[in-house]
Amino acid sequence: MPDAKNTPVAIRLLTPSTDDEWKHAEALITELKEWDVRQSQALGFAADEVISVFYPDNIEAIRRQSIQPDGCLIIAVDEIRPVGCAAFHRLTASACELYNVYVRPSHRGRAIGSTLLQRIRGEAKAASYDTMCLETATFMHAAHKLYRNFNFQVRKPYRAVAPRFADATIWMECCLLEELGAG
């Protein structure tokens, strides 16, 4: 029997436009938050403080921020179900923030994260942003590798967080005007 993880699966990328598609986006974002909270609790952070500091927006706010050209949210869908997402919203006239990058554990290792990042970068570039910024947690090692493959470099914080979160947060950015390398 073939290994299900290595079996090629066609992935469609879509921008949510129906209530059902937004419910799928909300489910993916909720899974990301729950995973992040579990990982953060191992570092001594309480669930409510992780949510309030790093996930302050509800799905309605995310929907408002994800309206083009200022923002965008993309869902990756296999044959029948959503398996990942990525979004950006405006920080300044020339910079946007990448956030809610997530691929379900059952679909990791299939380049879905790379596919999402390629598309979301293209959308941000088409929206005339020069720079894409992000914040990530120190324990998100696979994400760091993915971001480095897309030319993200460590930078200074672009927003204030409580000092107790500073050592657990990595800030990164990339220039959207540069072409991607082979990664």
Image (tube, grey):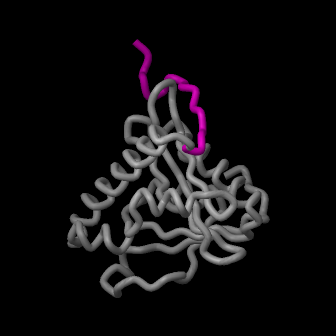
166 and 145: which is toward the camera: 166
Q: Position of residue 140 (x, y in %)?
A: 41, 60
Q: Nearer the viewer, residue 88 or 64?
A: 64
Whether residue 146 is situated above or below residue 84 in the rendered picture: below
Q: Residue at x 59, y 40 (%)?
A: 14
Magenta span main SS: loop
Residue range highlighted in magenta: 1-16
Q: Is residue 36 left or right of residue 71?
A: left
Residue 94 x, y percent position in the rendering: 72, 74
User: Residue drawn 61% across and 58% down?
Assistant: 67
Quarter occupied by the N terminus? top left
In the image, residue 91 lies at what x, y percent? 60, 75
Q: For the point 54% across and 25% down, which residue is it?
A: 9
The furthest residue to the top = 1
Looking at the image, is 108 positioned above or below residue 150?
above
Q: Establish if 132 lies above or below 5.
A: below
